[in-house]
Image (spheres, helix red, strand yellow):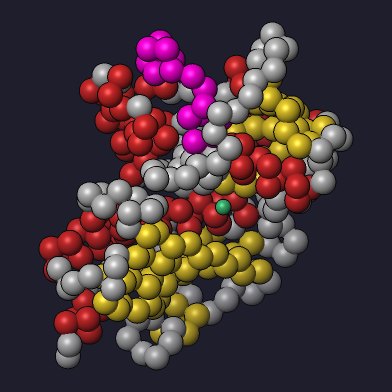
Amino acid sequence: MDEFSLIRQFFVDQPVSRSDVVLGIGDDGAVLQAPAGQQLVSTADTLVAGRHFPDATAAADVGYKALAVNLSDLAAMGAEPAWASLQLTLPEADESWLGQFRDGFFALAARHQVQLVGGDTVRGPLNVAVQLTGFVPPGQALTRGGAQPGDDIYVTGTLGDAALALQHLEVLSGPAQAWCRTRLNRPMPRCAAGIALRGVASAAIDLSDGLVADLGHVAEASGVGARIDVDLLPLSDAYREHRAAGGGLDAAVGGGDDYELCFTVAPAQQGRLEALAAGWDCGFTRIGVVTGDSGVEWHHGDGSSYRPGLTGFRHFT
Ligand SMILES: [Mg+2]
C-alpha cells in the first residue's frame, strides 16, 4: 500500500454508523439506502488553503469547518444531514496533521449523525472538498426563491464575528478575540433551525459570503427587494467592543463566514415561528422586511440611509 492508501485508513474508524449505509468506505463505491418517501438534498463545498482559511489554521479546525460549511448549506435547505464524502488533497502525508484533521471532522459529524461513506486522497496543494447528502420530505425543501413582499426577514445568532477575527482583532479584549476566533474556525451550522423552518419560512439562505451578498441572492431568486434596518442586526458582546472602539457595522453587514441562517416568514406564520424557535440553540432576530422593489435598501433605525462598505466577503485576501 502507498502512503495515500494508508491515509484512507485514517477515516475507516469513525464515530457514526448509520443503518442506511449498506456499504461504506472501502469498495469502489458506497451503497446507500434512501429513506422511503424522502427527497435527497445534495451539496458540495471546497475549502482551499490560503483562500478560504489562513495557512496557519489548525488541522482540527480545517476538518471541522470543511464539514460545517456543508452542514450549513443543508440547514439552509431545511434538510436533515446523513452522508458525507471527502476529497482531500494534501501536499504530504503528514500523519499528525491528518489525525487532528480527522478528529475535527468527526467531532462535528458525530454531533449531526453524519457518516463518512467515501472519498479520495491525492497529493497537491492543501484543498478539502466535502460532498454532503441529506433528506427532506417531498416539496418541503427551503429555497432562496419564495420570499414575498410583506414577509419579515430574520437572521439566527449574531453577525460579523468571523469577519472581526480576520480584520479587527487588535482592538478587542482577550475573551472577545477568543470568541471571534471560535466563530471563524468553529461555526455552528443551524441544522435544527433549518429543519424546524420547513413550512414556516418562505425563503432561506445561509450566510457564507455575508448579508449583503447572500440577501441579494434571496432578493434576486425571489424577484423581490428588501429593506434592512442595520441597527436591528444582532451583535455579540465582542462586536459591541468593536463598536465601542469606534468600529462600524461593515463586518456585520458585509462580512462573511458567519454561517448563520437568513430567512423570510410571512405575517401569517409569525406565531408558529415564535413557538418553534423556543427549542433552538440560537436566537433569531427580525432585521427588516421584504418589499416589492428590486434590490436591498439599507437604513438606520432613525430612517437615515446606510451604505454598506463591504459588498461580499473576499475571505481573508
Ligand atoms: Mg449556502
Let me know if residue 252 is in the magenta part: yes
Residue 134 point in image, percent of width and height: 55, 64
Say above or below: 156 vs 259: above
Q: Residue 177 occupies which quadrant of the picture? A: top left
Residue 196 seen in the current view: no
Report the residue that reaches farthest toward the right.
292
Quarter of the image that includes the N terminus: bottom left
Residue in the image at 44% along x and 62% along y:
46
Residue in the image at 70% along x and 53% along y:
143
Quarter of the image that includes the C terminus: top left
Q: Residue 98 occupies which quadrant of the picture? A: bottom left
In this rendered view, identify the residue nearer to me: 98 or 50: 50
Is 255 on the left or on the right of 177, as rendered? right
Let me know if residue 261 is in the magenta part: no
Stretch of the chain drawn in magenta:
240-255
Label the magenta part by its dominant secondary structure.
helix
